[in-house]
Image (spheres, rainbow, N blue to C red):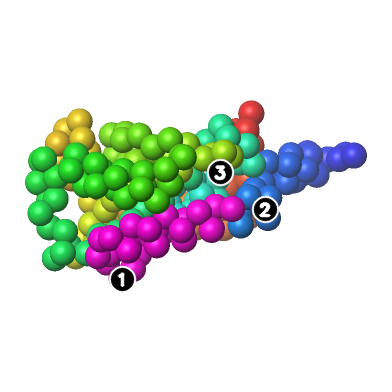
Amino acid sequence: MATTIKESFTAFASNVNITDRQETVVTNCKSNVGAKIKATLKLYNDEARVIGSWDRDTLVRYLSEGDVDVMVVLNYGANKGWDSADGTSQVLQRFKAILDEAYPTTPCSIDRHCVTMKLSEFRLDVVPAFSMTTGGYEIPDTRRKEWIKTDPVSFAERMTRINKAMDKDFIPLVKMVKAW
């Protein structure tokens, strides 16, 4: 039993960490979904990457209460027809069709920026994106009917720097607050 604040903090933090099995499931899911989309659409550097709370290491073990985000970066030259107001919906419809065909028993729906797959253990949000030459990415926003700039990779890197500066206590604190 923990006897100090630091020991209690460490014990609680370890109780909300992702398990090895969950990590394997998410990694396999990301690879499989990326491969299914890549089989139909040309990707930028074959890139499908996990972003969001998974990438920032702030996702808690209770996956059923959260989601995992996978960004699939499209090759702009091969897919630039979607770089328009109507393209924001069209790209999501295409992603959904690919995922519906590949996973016919998995419920899929189109959300504002992604296609959401309801898997047995968690929701998977599959986000189409274009890489920007100036850095970052653009993702579709179906409400505003435009592509919006985002940079989840830089955000995750900033979180890592903050965590390091705070003696590696910041990310566990974020996870504990989310679990609470």
Q: Which residues are magenta?
A: 25-49
Amino acid at circle 2:
Arg
Quadrant showing the N terminus: top right
Mark with earlier residue (1, 3): 1
Determine the secondary structure under disc 1. strand
Asked if 93 appears above or below 130 in the picture, the reply is: above
Mark with earlier residue (2, 3): 2
At x 42%, y 55%, the residue is 33
Residue 71 located left or right of residue 15: left
Asked if 75 appears above or below 141 in the picture, the reply is: below
Determine the secondary structure under disc 2. helix
Q: Residue 21 in the image: state x and y as whole percent.
A: 67, 53
Mark carried by residue 21: 2
Q: Residue 27 in the image: state x and y as whole percent.
A: 54, 58
Which of the two residues, 20 or 57, is positioned nearer the viewer here? 20
Q: How far is mark 1 from mark 3, CA to CA? A: 27 Å
Determine the secondary structure under disc 3. loop
At x 31%, y 34%, the residue is 111
Q: Residue 18 in the image: state x and y as whole percent.
A: 64, 48
At x 33%, y 57%, the residue is 37
Q: Quadrant of residue 10?
A: top right
Can the viewer see residue 158 in this picture? no
**Can you identify the residue that label 1 sits on?**
45
Mark carried by residue 59: 3
Quadrant showing the C terminus: top right
